[in-house]
Every structure is written in C-alpha cells, then in structure tokens.
Amino acid sequence: MEESQEDFSQYAEGLRKVRQRRWCFWSVILVYLPAIWISLTITQSDRATAKVFAVWFVLACIASCLSAFVRCPRCGNFFHVQGFIPMYLRSCLHCGLHLNADKKSGKR
C-alpha cells in the first residue's frame, strides 16, 4: 500500500503568516514583566504603571485576536480556534496541519 505524499510547500506562505502572528503574540506576552518592572522603577508611581499596563493589555488583546483568527492555508478554517476558545497549539485544530509542515517537507 502506497502512502500519498502531500506537497506542504504550497502552504509555506500561509504557515509563515501563522508563525509571524504567533511570534507577535508571544512577544507581547513576554514584554509584560519587563515593562511593568521598568515602569515601577522609573516612575515610582502606581498610576503611571497602570497606564503602562492598560497599553500592554490593549496590545495583548490585539495580538491575541490577530493570532487566533488567522486562517489555515490547508482547510481555510481558523488555525487556533475551534468553537469558542482559542488554543495556541502547534497544529491546526481542524485538519491537523503542523505549524512547521512546510519546513519539515523541505528536509525530506
């Protein structure tokens, strides 16, 4: 029995977009603690730090939405959302396309 080999290179552009948006999301998450610490250190003010938090929170919401609602290049559904809650796993929640499928197929 022969297995059909799918050409994942056709999904490279779409997967690159998914990876970029995920990187943006995780970068915003990682910036939180240093931003709050620097704000507290420099301003010594809870009010100024609350403003930094508010800006960070808005950016986190935007990055979360951008990352959650990116389309899978294979099936066309949202890559990270199935139902109501986004789950930032490394494969499409609908068709199972892995985040790095285009990179893995190039090594074969």
Image (spheres, rainbow, N blue to C red):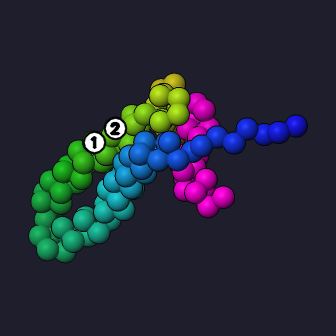
Residue at the spot 41% in from the left edge and 45% down from the top edge: 13
Look at the numbered disc 2 and give the secondary structure of its residue.
helix
Residues in magenta? 88-108
Above or below, 11 relative to 105: above
Answer with left or right where residue 81 lies relative to residue 29.
right
The residue carrying pointer 1 sits among few (fewer than 14), some (14 to 19) or many (20 or more) residues within 10 Å by Cα, namely: some
Callout 2 amino acid: Cys
Residue 50 in the image: state x and y as whole percent. Answer: 18, 54
Q: Nearer the viewer, residue 91 or 7?
A: 7
* Whether label 1 touches label 2, CB < 8 Å: yes
Q: Is residue 107 magenta?
A: yes
Callout 1 amino acid: Ile
Residue at the spot 27% in from the left edge and 42% down from the top edge: 62
Answer with left or right where residue 80 lies relative to residue 23.
right
Q: Which residue is mark 1?
A: 62
In the displayed image of the protein, which residue is found farthest to the top? 83
Residue 47 in the image: state x and y as whole percent. Answer: 13, 57
Q: Nearer the viewer, residue 31 or 36?
A: 31
Look at the numbered disc 1 and give the secondary structure of its residue.
helix
Residue 93 in the image: state x and y as whole percent. Answer: 57, 35
Q: Which residue is mark 2?
A: 65
